[in-house]
Image (tube, rainbow, N blue to C red):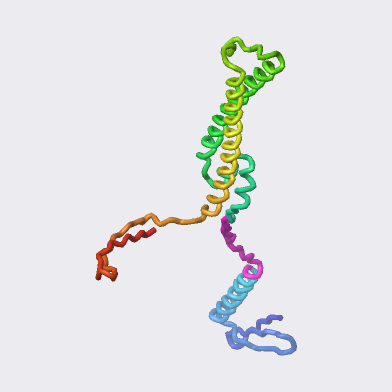
Amino acid sequence: MKRSEKGVKGSEKTNVHIGAVVFSLPFTPFHSLSFLLIIIFNFQFSIFNSAQAQRVEVKEPVEVKTVEVPKEHSANKALLLSLLPGAGQIYNGQAWKVPVIYGAFAGMGYFIHYYYSRATMFKDEYLYRINHNDTPDLADYASYPTSNIYSLYNSYDRNFQLMVIITVGIYALNLIDAYVFGHLYDFQIDDNISMGFSPGLVPTSMGLQPTLGVSFRF
């Protein structure tokens, strides 16, 4: 675009060349100011568009919440763990039973050792007397007849066997306890446990008989 200025009768004109078309505009201070404002507006608009194009949209990070799914409690797993006494009870959240279990085993171990040692002692004494013409070997039991020595052996031997059976029973109870409470682990009991009584009449051959009904709520 080319601009040329010529004086025509004391006034000024501006020739604006756009391509092959020539516009002849009167050049006044008002037109000059308007033309300047248009240029400034176009320049600011182009800067604004450029800034909009270069703007990078930053999104806030989305918080991801994880929901923990409770693991299913397995009674079979509690049973397998209880092969080691007390492990199943710990799995069921009843660790307080562990010292009870091992206390019972310790007590039974003491009695098993006691009765076994006494039974062995009297057995050896009896066999010694049989092989040595009723000659006693234990001075403390020299006055005891051989038949009494054999009776003592039988008594302590039976007690020894009984203690072994009880120990096996305690071990079995350990397994049963872990398995049963493994099933009851997720069982919820309402805190509002109540018991109610309700009177009533029951027809019998003698007529109506009063009764008292009992109901439990849990």
**Viewer-proximal residue among 30 and 131:** 131
Q: Quadrant of the N terminus?
A: bottom right
Examine the residues drawn in magenta and state their main secondary structure: loop
Q: Position of residue 213 (x, y in %)?
A: 31, 62
Extent of the magenta region: 51-70
Report the side of 194 relative to 15 (left or right): left
Q: Is residue 90 visible?
A: no
Q: Identify which residue is drawn at 59% across, 86% down.
A: 26
Q: Identify which residue is drawn at 61% across, 33% down.
A: 161
Q: Quadrant of the C terminus?
A: bottom left
Q: Position of residue 210 (x, y in %)?
A: 25, 65
In the image, farthest residue toward the right: 20
Q: Is residue 190 visible?
A: yes
Residue 96 against residue 180 in the figure, above or below: above
Residue 17 against residue 194 in the figure, above or below: below
Q: Identify which residue is drawn at 46% across, 56% down.
A: 188
Residue 137 against residue 44 in the figure, above or below: above
**Viewer-proximal residue among 62 and 190:** 190
Magenta segment: does it hold 197?
no
**Viewer-proximal residue among 5 and 92:** 92
Q: Position of residue 166 (x, y in %)?
A: 57, 37
**Viewer-proximal residue among 97 and 68:** 97
Report the side of 69 relative to 22 (left or right): left
Q: Identify which residue is drawn at 56% across, 81% down.
A: 31
Magenta segment: does it hold 63?
yes
Q: Position of residue 57 (x, y in %)?
A: 62, 65
